[in-house]
Image: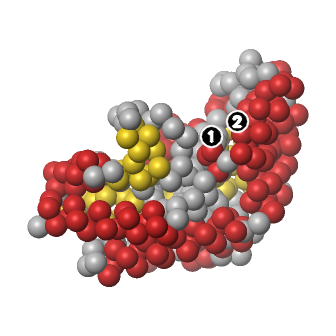
């Protein structure tokens, strides 16, 4: 683990040295934004730090209510319930609504937290469809006979490859087979849709996705997770979910900073635009230099290496040369598909990215030949 002794920015300090940061999920630069800092400090002065209780007892501060309202407004959903992480929100969404007699149909590249959540639900009948393969999804649904519920669950943006789920088609197919749809939009929040409203807004599918899970730990710059959907859905989470009832409420500064983050996004799409501009700039530079950057259509930028050891060595060499870029290998991706995963942010300047590309080219020559 690298120990960071600076704010999350375009550069990170490790020891005495500064490194170009190409691996945080700080898409919009909100993690160290002065507006969020100020909101957190003011809230601490007013309310203190901790909530000292679960939400359902005395842990619900008026800030939590304000944040849930703000998020529901931003997502254009009827209601929204905030939990302490995206991982926890997936657990809550699946365990609350799916029992052992129901059926889950899941994309093969779904995030670990969805896989764990399905395990926790103890559902007996589960299917995995080939990645984003709509014919396979259809065929699986065609064969299901159940008196229980059917849940089709997918990542919105796939976190290792950066491709986007075919949500309009998934919704259409699910409707035909009377299945519920859940999307985990962790890497789409703050990135896709108008002002970063996420994948549902990107495809104009408001009201057609039953369960929308999001994280507040990536583009939103703080930590936490949420479930957006109907009022009935969210109230059920508030009254039944073990992940809501048996763990402490999100802290005061986190909650206040998140309200400020939603305000920043509501007010302007400048950061989202800058993120996409930087994404194009980084991808163009790498492609021109001949790198295989996979099939990403989002800021997530894989640089394919293949061999596990080479990917690690590539990353280490970059670090020696002042660039932080995470190596991604088995079990995060299949064997033989090791890569670097670069994450541009709205806070990078063109010069930062130019410098990064140059060093990446130089290190690749040394390590990969
Ligand atoms: C990051 C991520 C999560 C976990 O979110 P946290 O808020 O960090 O717990 C869940 N799902 C996906 C797809 C993610 O990328």
Is any atom of residue 295 visible in this view? Answer: yes
Residue 288, picture quadrant: bottom left
Q: Nearer the viewer, residue 14 or 113?
A: 14
Q: Secondary structure at mark 2?
A: helix
Residue at 85% x, 49% y: name it.
69
- Label 1 Cα crowd, 10 Å radius (few <14 / some 14-19 / many 20+): many
| Residue 292: % across, % down | 28, 74
Q: Look at mark 1 in the image and give the residue it sits on.
A: 223
Q: CA distance from mark 1 to mark 2?
A: 7 Å
Q: Is mark 1 within 8 Å of ligand 1?
A: yes
Q: Look at mark 2 in the image and give the residue it sits on.
A: 254
Q: Secondary structure at mark 1?
A: loop
Q: Quadrant of the C terminus?
A: bottom left
Residue at 70% x, 64% y: name it.
197
Residue 255, picture quadrant: top right
- Label 2 Cα crowd, 10 Å radius (few <14 / some 14-19 / many 20+): many
| Residue 161: % across, % down | 39, 64
Residue at 68% x, 24% y: name it.
248
* Colouring used for the render: secondary structure
Image position of 201 with respect to 104: above or below: below
């Amino acid at each position: 683990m690298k120990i960071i002794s600076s704010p999350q920015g375009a550069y990170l300090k490790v020891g005495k040295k500064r490194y170009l940061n190409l691996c945080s999920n700080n898409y919009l630069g909100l993690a160290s934004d002065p507006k969020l800092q100020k909101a957190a400090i003011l809230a601490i002065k007013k309310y203190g730090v901790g909530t000292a209780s679960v939400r359902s007892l005395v842990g619900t501060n008026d800030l939590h209510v304000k944040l849930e309202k703000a998020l529901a407004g931003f997502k254009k959903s009827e209601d929204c319930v905030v939990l302490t992480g995206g991982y926890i929100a997936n657990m809550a969404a699946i365990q609350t609504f799916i029992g052992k007699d129901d059926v889950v149909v899941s994309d093969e590249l779904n995030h670990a937290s969805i896989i764990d959540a399905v395990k926790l639900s103890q559902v007996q009948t589960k299917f995995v469809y080939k990645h984003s393969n709509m014919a396979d999804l259809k065929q699986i649904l065609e064969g299901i006979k159940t008196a229980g519920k059917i849940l089709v669950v997918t990542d919105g943006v796939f976190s290792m490859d950066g491709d986007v789920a075919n949500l309009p088609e998934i919704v259409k197919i699910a409707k035909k087979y009377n299945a519920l749809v859940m999307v985990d939009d962790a890497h789409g929040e703050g990135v896709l849709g108008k002002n970063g409203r996420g994948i549902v807004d990107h495809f104009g599918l408001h009201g057609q996705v039953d369960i929308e899970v999001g994280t507040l730990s990536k583009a939103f710059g703080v930590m936490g997770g949420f479930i957006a959907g109907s009022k009935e859905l969210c109230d059920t989470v508030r009254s039944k979910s073990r992940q809501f009832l048996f763990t402490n409420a999100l802290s005061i500064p986190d909650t206040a900073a998140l309200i400020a983050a939603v305000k920043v996004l509501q007010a302007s799409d400048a950061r989202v635009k800058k993120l996409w501009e930087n994404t194009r700039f980084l991808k163009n530079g790498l492609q021109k230099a001949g790198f295989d950057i996979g099939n990403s259509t989002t800021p997530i930028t894989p640089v394919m290496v293949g061999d596990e050891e080479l990917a690690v060595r590539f990353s280490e060499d970059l670090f020696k040369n002042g660039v932080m870029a995470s190596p991604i290998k088995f079990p995060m991706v299949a064997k033989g598909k090791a890569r670097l995963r670069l994450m541009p942010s709205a806070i990078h300047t063109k010069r930062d990215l130019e410098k990064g590309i140059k060093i990446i080219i130089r290190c690749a020559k040394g390590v990969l030949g």
